[in-house]
Image (cartoon, rainbow, N blue to C red):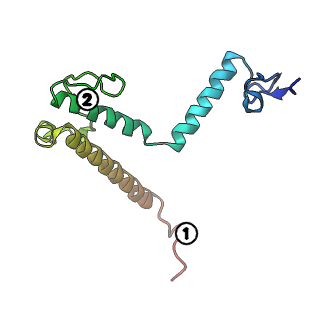
Amino acid sequence: MAPKKRCSVCRKLFLPDPRVGARQHACREKHCQRQRRARTQASWRSRNPSYQADDRLKRRAITAAAAERGGERDGDPARDPPARPHAPLRVPAVLASFPWELAYTKLGFAGADLLASLALLLVRLVNVVKDEKMAERLLPTEVYGLAGSDP
């Protein structure tokens, strides 16, 4: 008989499923399984932060390519979704004045999506720099003795 283990969520003792054995860390309670799954997913997302955006852009590129080919598909709906009108990427208000329709016309959907992604990264970078400059103004390092040691 397998030894009992302590559930990583509710801390109660349980007998692990013999098919899972030493790899099982949570008991069979639905609440504990949900918590274990949430932790696992959060851990995976923290190790792969760009997966969601990459996957979304890849799916948009496949859809756009199918639309440009006139709806031709290779028969696998998971890899090649049906062709439909392509909505532009959502962008922050600061980028809304950019002529996105022209970008989609001239660059195609993949090129315009790439341009939108790069613009979004630049906006985020500018916001980080602004936040750092604001922090420097609010908390001058000289006041707290955190400046360099040279007089």
Location of residue 96 with respect to 77 vertically, above or below: below
Q: Position of residue 130 (x, y in %)?
A: 36, 54
Choose between 76 and 11: the one closer to the eye. Answer: 76
| Residue type beneath disc 2 | Thr
> Dot 2 surroundings within 10 Å: few (below 14), some, or many (20 or more)?
many
Location of residue 71 with respect to 98 vertically, above or below: above
> At x 22% / y 29%, what residue is drawn?
66
Q: Position of residue 109 (x, y in %)?
A: 20, 37
| Residue type beneath disc 1 | Leu
Assign the N terminus to one quadrant of the image.
Answer: top right
Q: Indicate the quadrant where residue 113 lies.
A: top left
Task: Write down the residue under mark 2.
Answer: 63
Task: Write down the residue under mark 1.
Answer: 146
Q: Residue furthest top?
A: 30
Q: Indicate the quadrant where residue 112 lies.
A: top left
Whether residue 81 can be seen here: yes
Q: Which structural element holds mark 2? A: helix
Location of residue 75 with respect to 54 vertically, above or below: above
Q: Residue furthest bottom?
A: 151
